[in-house]
Amino acid sequence: MKKLLFQFDTDAFPSVFDTVVGYDGGADHVIGHANVTTDTVVKLVEGAIFTRAPKDKKNTAIFVGGSSLQAGQEVYDAVMSTFFSNFRVSVMLDSNGSNTTAAAGVARLKNSTSISGKKAVLLAGTGPVGQRAAVLLARLGADVSITSRSMSRATDACKAMSSQYNVELNPVQAATNQDRATAIEDAQIVFACGAAGVRLLEQSHWSSLKQLQVIMDANATPELGVEGIDMMDRGEQRHESICWGAIGFGTLKLDLHRTCISRLFDDNKTLLNIEEIFSIAEQLAG
């Protein structure tokens, strides 16, 4: 029986990246649906849960994606509310790659240093990856701050994650590179999560910080988010800090994404959101 992965994307077009990884993760067919909303997803889910016998339902799975973390979470919740009894299939949520990227990044940070009791700063952390990484770091015991050019945006992101995951996060306004340099002055962990091609820190802003233990940049598009880190860095020691570049920890992100897709077909009850995906990332990171 064919393994079918239904890709429910909240954007105008299903993500090509997610489609490719769906196949690489073991799906025989990836069927993409675009502009999926909480109103339209119910009929799609019903088609997935009513068409195969109980013993065969493990061969059908759902992947929820798209660029909006909030829209993806709402669709994921709507999918879950449609299930009943054993009329269900496995589901993974990874809007904008946020869960797999954040989980891979934090797993590598955890490999590099102890997290509990440390100050961690998510630079430009109000996007999907930054928000999810902030939750994971807070749950590991870090004192976590999220920076944004806008204080209101930083505050909104912190409130949203705090409400959903019961963690304490600190909003910080940092509109310029110098502001961000000030924000990390006493941080032990820095994770830059800015938009592609946007420089967030100059090398001089972090290279002399004695207390900075690990610095990670999620941007692989020139110019990189943190000057002085190479996108291929895999825990290299630069100045006083352990450095991770986007490709350096991105290999784990891709392995994680593929592994998660594969596990969706183990049974019809697997649910992969941030906590479960991070658990798998820890296993893969060793």
Image (tube, rainbow, N blue to C red):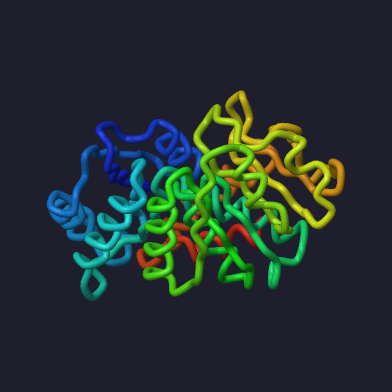
Percent coordinates x, y for residue 90 in the rendering: 36, 60
Q: Quick check: 149 above or below 266?
A: above
Report the residue that reaches farthest toward the top: 222
Q: Quadrant of residue 12?
A: top left
Q: In the picture shown, does residue 75 fall above or below 233?
A: below
Seen in the image, is 136 located left or right of residue 97?
Answer: right
The residue shown at (21%, 39%) is: 35
Where the C terminus falls, by quadrant?
A: bottom right
> Looking at the image, which is closer to me, 269 or 255?
255
Above or below, 265 against 227 in this view is below
Q: Nearer the viewer, residue 200 or 6?
A: 200
> Relative to residue 214, is residue 200 drawn left or right?
left
Left or right, 30 with respect to 222, comes to left
Nearest the eye: 135 or 34: 135
Q: Quadrant of residue 74?
A: bottom left
Could you tell me if residue 60 is visible in this image? no
Identified at 29% across, 42% down, the residue is: 9
At a point 84% along the width and 53% down the height, the residue shown is: 210
Q: Position of residue 81 (x, y in %)?
A: 21, 67
